[in-house]
Image (cartoon, helix red, strand yellow):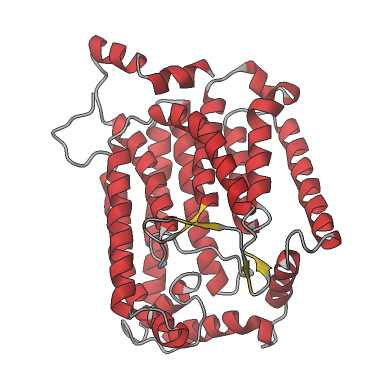
Amino acid sequence: MRNKNNIILGDRVLWVALALLSIFSFLPVFSASSNLTYVVGQGTPWSHLLKHFIVLVFGFGLMYALHKTPYQYFKGISILALPLVVLLLIYTASQGNLIAGANANRWIRIPIVGMSFQTSTLASIVLLSYVAHLMSKENPKLYRLKTSIVPLWLPVFLVVLLILPANLSTAVLLFFTILILVFLGGYPIKYLLGILTMGFFMVLLFILLAKAYPDWVPNRIDTWVSRIENFSNSEDIGGNYQIERAKTAVATGGLLGLGAGKSVMKNFLPQSSSDFIYAIIVEEFGLVGGTALILLYLIVLFRIVVIAHKSDTVYGKLLVLGLGLPIIIQAFVNMAVALQVFPVTGQTLPLISSGGTAAWMTCIAFGMILSVSAGQKIEENTSKESEDKNENPLTILSEAL
């Protein structure tokens, strides 16, 4: 039974690390938002800071509510939500949004709050929870290729292919995370190699079709190619504008940085408050601040591994790793892009970058991880409480699949 006398459950170190990341984010977001104010002409630095504050407060509210929820319920929720997120992805892809002539079908508009919602992040959470549930059942049919196609790989390829046209990096990260999950769940490696080969050829087929029918995915393939070419070309050409400004910001920071709010490149670097916020952090807080941020993410990674190790259920272990690893990988990819180690991907810095629903999805994922951690610190239910739990429709649904 969950101890209702404790306000906060779960891994306290993880709670503190997440709180520190969020509190620190106000400094670079407030500073970098001047680009949106004076260059783009959107709002004021204070309005962007207030929006960021509201987003994080609501996100931590979601995290708190989820960490109080028994994580076993997420099994049934993922089963019910999977067809809904597929429909949501189809609706998102059918909108035909274009930005500068390129495909931008990543977001849908939330009518009441007026914010854009990236459906791929929600779909990723639901799919990862669903796969973790399937692999925890230890059903022999799931370990044979033919009998696992419909329950396991059909939903995986459907979701990944719906995300792929507008968001290649998210689709690739999601697919490889799922491969890691099913491998840890005991899926035969010989079949995994076949699935990996199939995924490669499906991406290749998509690229060929997009090249043959450019109106289907306007300019998307050209965008991917140009990003790779710009990354491999060290010359300061027009296509390298963002990277060159980011490199200048990092080089300017030195050891201790220019000081909070004193960044110069924030006014010249596009997406300085989101995709390239790490460059602004290094410019203002120097190598020391940039390294401290990396160490903070490493602490989060360490606690994720600890929580997964301590979980006494296969589902708990797979759920924690499936939701936690992509967030940490995303963080390091974002930082690597700013340092020109990776080509531009469009991935934000979790809990740091200015944004809306992306931060909420991160908080939802950590809420589910903390729910697993909270379950480790709770005594076994009494017989009556166990009976009530077994009568929960979400538990019944998850066990019936």
Q: Residue at x 58, y 52 (%)?
A: 92
Quadrant, the N terminus: top left
Residue 252 image point, x, y percent: 45, 88
**Residue at 75%, 32% in the rendered image:** 190
Q: Residue 164 at x, y = what percent?
A: 67, 53
In the picture, measured across the screen, residue 321 lies left or right of residue 11, that is right
Quarter of the image for the C terminus: give it. top right
Looking at the image, the residue that sits furthest to the left is: 5
Residue occupying the point 32% across, 67% down: 51
Question: Can residue 141 be seen by looking at this rendering?
Answer: yes
- On screen, residue 230 versus residue 281, left or right, reads right
**Relative to 289, is 50 on the left or the right?**
left
Vertical side of 136 occupied by 237: above or below:
below
Picture quadrant of residue 344: bottom right
- Whether residue 24 appears in this view of the structure is no
| Outermost residue to the right | 212
Total number of numbered labels? 0
Residue 253: x and y in percent read 42, 84
Residue 368, given in percent of the width and then of the height, sits at: 38, 39
Closer to the camera, 224 or 285?
Answer: 224
Q: Nearer the viewer, residue 149 or 282?
A: 149
Residue 153 occupies quadrant: top right
Residue 68 is left or right of residue 229, and the answer is left
Q: Is residue 270 above or below residue 70?
A: below
5 or 96: nearer the eye?
96
From the viewer's perspective, is residue 298 above or below residue 85?
below
Q: Residue furthest front?
A: 111
